[in-house]
Image: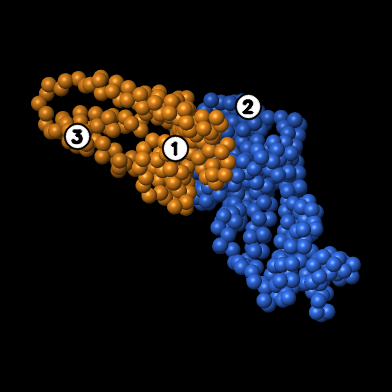
Chain colours: A blue, B orange
Amino acid sequence: MDLRELVAAMFLFALIVMPLESLQAQSVRPPANAVNQGIDKQIDEQIGTSNTLGTNSQSDYWRDLRHGKDGLATSGQSGRKLIQAQGEQWRIVRKTYIVKYGGWVLATAIFLIVLFYLIRGKIRLKAGRSGETISRFSLPHRTAHWFMASIFILLSISGLILLLGRTVLMPVIGKNAHSIVASAAMQGHNLFGPLFIVALIWLTFMFIRGNFFQMADLKWILKGGGLLGPHASAGHYNFGEKGWFWLVVIAGSIMAITGMILEFPWLAESLQLLQISVIVHAIGAIALISAALGHIYIGTLGMEGALDSMTTGDVDVVWAKEHHDLWYEEVTGQKVANPEAEGSQSIPDHNQISAQSQTTET
Amino acid sequence: MSLLQIFEGPLFYIAVTVFMIGATWRILGIIAIGRKTDISPPKASANVGFIAGNLRHFLPRKVFAKRTWVHIVAGYSFHLGLFVLVIFAAPHITFFHDRIWDIRWPALPRWGLIIAAQFAFAGLIMLWVRRFSDPVMRLISDWDDHIGSWLTFLVMLTGCLALQESHDALKATHMLFVDIWLIYFPFSRLMHAMTFFLSRGYTGATYGRKGMNL
């Protein structure tokens, strides 16, 4: 009996004597007692194949299975290996760390947002709305933003189902329903994935101007963004918005690359690359979704007047003075003396502001 | 009888009947309105104007091209993508063959189907985004426009989610939205798919008869 037949016989033996649950739960790493004479004896009794030549120990078999052996007939990228030991490490990392802690990271992000809302409440305009607006984002800017947002939401929902569905959904909806939802999520995720790349490129080109870091951002950070204390001046984008932009660009690019590797596995030269891609893709997704929750909160519930910039494209003049005073000064040419008490000041002609703002944006 | 059998059986035939009768009624109604008799001597052919008016609208006006390129690209992307999806998807060809007529034609390979779906989705999302972010579009849009967009999106989405063809529940969901879409179609602005050539043609014929440059 050559080694190939021996391996096949051992595999058959394992299938016969081990219940399915124990097979799933057991590590594929060689057991500590791989050279245990008791096991050798059992195998001898069952199939009479162990160590028939007296030259191989059980550890030798495991070593051959894991590291390859001439004469083993396998196909694909695994070479002559029948067991890829890193696969077990990948499984443990994904199941034990990514799924478990990823879920907790998301839950923590939601908890912190709720906590912040309860403590700080909605950030209102101190001087109230003036009724006069200033143009902040052009139609192409808004279209690029909402296109990305739509794709991002579809990918987030389907991706979270794929990542956490087995842990979170299956106990609630059952195996059959989870199977249906997971199948749909996989198709949807694969379909919308390439569109994310289109959206990312479009978004990057539309918003990169004005998103490079400046000295004003350091002052903004030192003042905690004005959330906790005195007013923090900001240009067209504050440090938080710039950070979010670059997170989307950098993490989004990594997500795009790893996503393409996973969607088109033949792009990967090795199985390890696929496994690394799964882990990196999942970590990137958790980071992006957590940050997106904060972005969505501050753009809607968290701050009065912020959503206007992405729906109508115009923001109230008071909002511009209180949150982006340097940008207001740049656009209007008027100094904002005290951004937190500007509501009662005279307001420049709206048409003039709009025209100037559009010129700077487009 | 399972839900899938109901949705792609009796409900589907009811939906198609409503769709056919409703759409025919609407088109006949528009044609029956006719147009006011123009007693002035024609300077050119109204029939040529009808055709020219239809063809001319497929291309953007140069003067508006810079302002409108996003929704023109999105419009073509969505409509062509959807057309390819509906006509050349292998499951659709099989469905038409089994349920409507005894004809088959070549189907797109799976990768072609995916690309067509991506064009259709990208276009539809951009068109809907424009509907609420463009001040003029927002002003002239009502619930009918949004419902039409969302129904179409859900039909496409549920169809693509069922691509694996491994669960009847996903196919049943898709068929349910198809049935709703077919019933809603004649009573909504989705009818533009069947009436656009009449409105373009009417404008073209009117201007053409007056000898205006289309």
Who's the residue at 70% across and 44% down the image? A166
Please give left or right for residue A306 compared with residue B79 in the image.
Answer: right
Q: Name the foreground residue: A8 vs A136.
A: A8
Tag 1 residue: B127
Pointer 1 local density, CA inside 10 Å: few below 14, some 14–19, many at least 20: many
Q: Up-down: is B29 above or below A227?
A: above
Give yes or no for contact between labels 2 and 3 (Cβ–Cβ under 8 Å): no
Give x and y (percent) for residue A316. Answer: 55, 30
Give x and y (percent) for residue A83. Answer: 71, 66
Q: Please report, as a chain letter, where disc 1 is located.
A: B
Q: Earlier in the sequence, mark 1 or mark 3?
A: 3
In three-dimensional space, the C-alpha distance between marks 2 and 1, rounded to whole angstroms, equals 37 Å
Q: How many marks?
A: 3
Please give left or right for residue A45 compared with residue A130 in the image.
Answer: right
Query: For residue B181, which quarter of the picture?
Result: top left
Give yes or no for contact between labels 1 and 3 (Cβ–Cβ under 8 Å): no
Do marks 2 and 3 share a chain?
no
* Residue A330 can be seen in this image: no
| Circle 2 or circle 1, nearest the eye | 1
Tag 2 residue: A127
Inspect the image, locate mark 3, and give the three-letter code of the amino acid beneath it.
Gly
Inspect the image, locate mark 2, and give the three-letter code of the amino acid beneath it.
Ala
The image quadrant where one finds the C terminus of chain A is: top left
Q: Please report, as a chain letter, where disc 2 is located.
A: A
Pointer 2 local density, CA inside 10 Å: few below 14, some 14–19, many at least 20: some
Mark 3: which secondary structure? helix
Tag 3 residue: B49
Query: For residue B60, which quarter of the picture?
Result: top left
Q: Please report, as a chain letter, where disc 3 is located.
A: B
Who's the residue at 79% across and 67% down the image? A47
